[in-house]
Image (cartoon, helix red, strand yellow):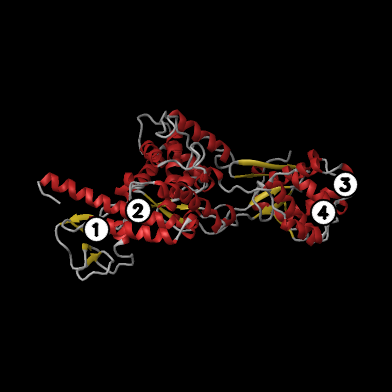
């Protein structure tokens, strides 16, 4: 196995302009991987076992262990060198696995005669026996070989491959769509107990436990991928003083990942509570020392090659959360935390609040806008049967969450900017007023009840008339629309109605306390 790069001074590597490789004084050869141009990684290809260290892990591609005939190995190596200039070092492992699958699926005779001996029918047979990722990796390699006229690869077959699906049946985020209680999004009740756990500071908490708690807490507030949170540098936390008050605002500078790697990192705001907890963590002597050495914000003591690797982080967080013995209100079993489920929860929550595909893609930094579809679809798949089957009237579906929709206040007088029920009437039905100082870009009435903090609901208004209006409108639109297209529409109607129900309930409670009648 190649010697790790920690024994090589990167500053002394010299580029060989003929080969495009970087060489050391001792003759070692490296590929400069600029998957993230801001932090290039050097892949050692001196021997037949290529290797690199990246994101807390060691990756390798052992060519002798593959035992591929030269007719296949030689052209694939030349293409792999070019790909590794821009692909993450973990591509070494992906390629090794894909080539093992190819060798297992094809006969030795086919391989020794080179790729030119494999017909479309042969490739289809091989295709059916490989995993989705292996198919994608081989397809990409074959396309590059065909473009360069190497290894007998055919342009005609390359074009055919591009039309083949990697999987016979694609099930996108099936755990999300099925609301899987173990792998899908956490329920709202589960989120409450999880956040209570993450914000709790137990006496005698170890540095490792605190780090894992912060790791989960940061993912909950930012919805970033685990690799992004683990890769944050030592000075990622930014504190900004609010000149109008004595309070501070906190931000984290979080690097990009996956297809966005290499783009400038962005600042994402976090709560003051989380910001102060991170500051307390960084003040611990062992953390301060290791943080400077490794230039990482989160230090657990388990770091290898600058940071903890993803699989170790996954296992450690799962073990820590299980050991807290916090029971799920849904399954009655101990809650196990994972970064993937945290992201599922955040995305599903955004979809429940009516966020569109672009908004979810922006916050979660999905490479494709279509990645958000599963979260939007799961909300529709979950809510439509409830909307269609309930006989309790509009607003009933969200009645348990009504205070999440009405965010305004109950007042005794109508202000200068009245809000009315949007119906044709000689006498407008006033339900409240807008307390916003400047112009409002929100839709009047609908968004007043449904989450606007500037809505001042008039105590003496007939809010039951608002509920009647919403019921009639829902029935009218329901008769015109149908099926899956109603998911967002039905949710908007019911969310607004839930806000109206909460206004009525708050007025009744307040009047009862003061001996008034509604």
Q: Nearer the viewer, residue 416 or 201?
A: 416
**First of labels 2, 1 by sequence position:** 1
Judge the density around disc 3: few (<14), some (14-19), many (≥20) Cα neighbours within 10 Å.
some
The N terminus - image quarter: top right
- Residue closest to the far bottom: 426
Q: Nearer the viewer, residue 499 or 339?
A: 499
Residue located beneath label 2 in the image: 495
Mark 3 and mark 4: Cα distance apart in space: 13 Å
Mark 1 and mark 3: Cα distance apart in space: 77 Å
Query: Does 209 sit left or right of 259 as displayed?
Result: left
Closer mark to the observer between disc 1 and disc 4? 1
**First of labels 3, 4 by sequence position:** 3
Closer mark to the observer between disc 1 and disc 3? 1
Q: Position of residue 11 (x, y in %)?
A: 64, 52
**Secondary-structure class at tag 2:** helix
Q: Position of residue 443 (x, y in %)?
A: 33, 65
Closer mark to the observer between disc 4 and disc 2? 2
Mark 2 and mark 3: Cα distance apart in space: 62 Å
Residue located beneath label 4 in the image: 120
Mark 2 and mark 1: Cα distance apart in space: 16 Å
- The numbered dot on residue 465 is 1
**First of labels 4, 2 by sequence position:** 4
Residue located beneath label 3 in the image: 110
């Amino acid at each position: 196995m190649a010697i790790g790069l920690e024994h090589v001074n990167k500053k002394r590597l010299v580029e060989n302009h003929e080969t495009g490789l970087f060489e050391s004084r001792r003759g070692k050869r490296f590929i400069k991987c600029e998957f993230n141009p801001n932090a290039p990684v050097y892949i050692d290809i001196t021997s037949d076992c290529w290797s690199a260290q990246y994101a807390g892990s060691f990756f390798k591609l052992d060519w002798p262990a593959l035992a591929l005939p030269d007719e296949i190995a030689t052209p694939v190596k030349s293409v792999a060198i070019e790909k590794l200039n821009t692909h993450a070092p973990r591509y070494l492992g992906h390629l090794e696995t894909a080539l093992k699958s190819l060798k297992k699926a094809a006969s030795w005779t086919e391989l020794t005669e080179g790729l030119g001996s494999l017909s479309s029918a042969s490739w289809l047979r091989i295709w059916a026996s490989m995993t989705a990722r292996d198919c994608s990796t081989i397809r990409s390699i074959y396309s590059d070989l065909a473009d360069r006229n190497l290894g007998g690869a055919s342009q005609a077959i390359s074009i055919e491959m591009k039309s083949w699906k990697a999987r016979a049946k694609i099930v996108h985020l099936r755990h999300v769509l099925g609301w899987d209680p173990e792998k899908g999004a956490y329920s709202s009740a589960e989120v409450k107990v999880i956040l209570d756990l993450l914000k709790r500071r137990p006496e005698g908490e170890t540095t490792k436990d605190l780090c894992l708690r912060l790791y989960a807490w940061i993912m909950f507030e930012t919805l970033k991928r685990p690799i992004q949170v683990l890769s944050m540098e030592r000075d990622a936390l930014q504190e900004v003083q609010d000149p109008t008050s004595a309070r501070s605002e906190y931000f984290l500078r979080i690097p990009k990942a996956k297809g966005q790697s290499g783009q400038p990192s962005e600042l994402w705001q976090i709560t003051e509570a989380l910001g102060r907890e991170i500051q307390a963590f960084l003040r611990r002597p062992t953390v301060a020392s290791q943080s400077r050495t490794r230039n990482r914000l989160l230090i657990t003591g388990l770091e290898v090659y600058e940071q903890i690797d993803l699989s170790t982080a996954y296992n450690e967080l799962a073990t820590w959360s299980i050991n807290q013995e916090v029971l799920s209100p849904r399954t009655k079993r101990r809650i196990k935390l994972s970064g993937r489920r945290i992201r599922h929860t955040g995305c599903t929550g955004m979809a429940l609040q009516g966020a569109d595909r672009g908004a979810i893609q922006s916050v979660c930094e999905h490479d494709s806008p279509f990645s958000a579809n599963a979260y939007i679809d799961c909300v529709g798949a979950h809510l439509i049967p409830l909307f269609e089957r309930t006989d309790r009237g509009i607003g009933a579906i969200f009645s348990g969450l009504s205070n999440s929709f009405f965010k305004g206040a109950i007042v005794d007088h109508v202000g200068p900017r009245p809000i009315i029920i949007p119906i044709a009437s000689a006498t407008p039905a006033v339900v409240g007023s807008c307390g916003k100082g400047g112009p409002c870009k929100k839709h009047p009435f609908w968004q007043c009840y449904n989450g606007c903090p500037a809505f001042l609901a008039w105590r003496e208004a007939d809010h039951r008339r608002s509920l009647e209006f919403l019921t009639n409108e829902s029935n009218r639109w329901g008769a015109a629309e149908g099926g899956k297209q109603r998911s967002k529409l039905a949710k908007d109607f019911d969310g607004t109605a839930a806000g109206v129900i909460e206004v009525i309930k708050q007025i009744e409670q307040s009047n009862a306390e003061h001996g008034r009648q509604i």
